[in-house]
C-alpha cells in the first residue's frame, strides 16, 4: 500500500524502483533510436566500404543502437536517481504533482 503524497495527498504514487525501470527503459529506447538514426544518417568514411558491403552499414547501425541504448539507459537511471533527495527511507514519486519524497518504514 503506497503512502499518500506528502504535498498533494494523492494516492497515485509509484515506488522508486518502478520509476527507475521506466526511466531506464525510456532512456534506452531513446538512446537506441538516436544512435541508429545518427549512424545511418551521418556522412562517414564508412560510406566507401558500405557501398561494397551494405551489411556492414547495418551492423554499424545496430552497434550504435546498442551502445546508444546503454548510454541512454544509464542517463535515464541517473535522471531518476537525481530526482530523489538523499536520505533514509523508501523513495516514492507522486504522479499527481511530481513530488518526490521518502517515507521511513
Ligand atoms: Zn503529489
Image: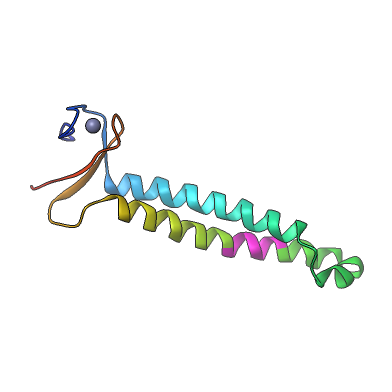
Instruction: Return the x and y of residue 16 as percentages of the image width and height.
Output: 28, 47
Q: How many marks?
A: 0
The quadrant of the rendering that contains the N terminus is: top left
Q: Specify start and end residues of the magenta stretch as a single range.
A: 61-67
For the point 29% across and 29% down, the residue is 96
For the point 19% across and 28% down, the residue is 8
Along the line of sight, which residue is nearer the eye, 29 or 8?
A: 8
Which picture quadrant has residue 2? Answer: top left
Check the image and name the residue furthest to the right.
Answer: 52
Instruction: Return the x and y of residue 3 as percentages of the image width and height.
Output: 15, 35
Which picture quadrant has residue 6? Answer: top left
Q: Is residue 14 left or right of residue 67?
A: left
Say if 90 sits above or below 70 in the image: above
Check the image and name the residue furthest to the left.
Answer: 105
- Name the colouring of the figure: rainbow
For the point 17% across and 49% down, the residue is 90
Along the line of sight, which residue is nearer the eye, 17 or 96?
A: 96
Q: Is residue 16 left or right of residue 76?
A: left
Q: Is residue 56 magenta?
A: no
Amino acid at each position: 500500500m503506497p503512502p499518500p503524497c506528502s504535498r498533494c495527498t494523492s494516492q497515485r504514487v509509484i515506488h522508486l524502483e518502478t520509476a527507475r525501470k521506466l526511466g531506464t527503459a525510456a532512456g534506452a529506447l531513446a538512446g537506441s533510436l538516436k544512435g541508429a538514426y545518427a549512424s545511418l544518417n551521418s556522412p562517414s568514411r564508412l560510406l566507401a566500404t558500405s557501398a561494397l558491403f551494405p551489411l556492414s552499414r547495418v551492423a554499424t547501425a545496430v552497434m550504435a543502437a546498442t551502445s546508444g541504448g546503454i548510454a541512454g539507459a544509464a542517463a535515464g537511471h541517473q535522471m531518476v536517481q537525481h530526482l530523489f533527495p538523499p536520505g533514509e527511507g523508501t523513495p516514492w514519486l507522486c504522479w499527481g504533482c511530481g513530488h518526490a519524497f521518502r517515507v521511513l518504514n
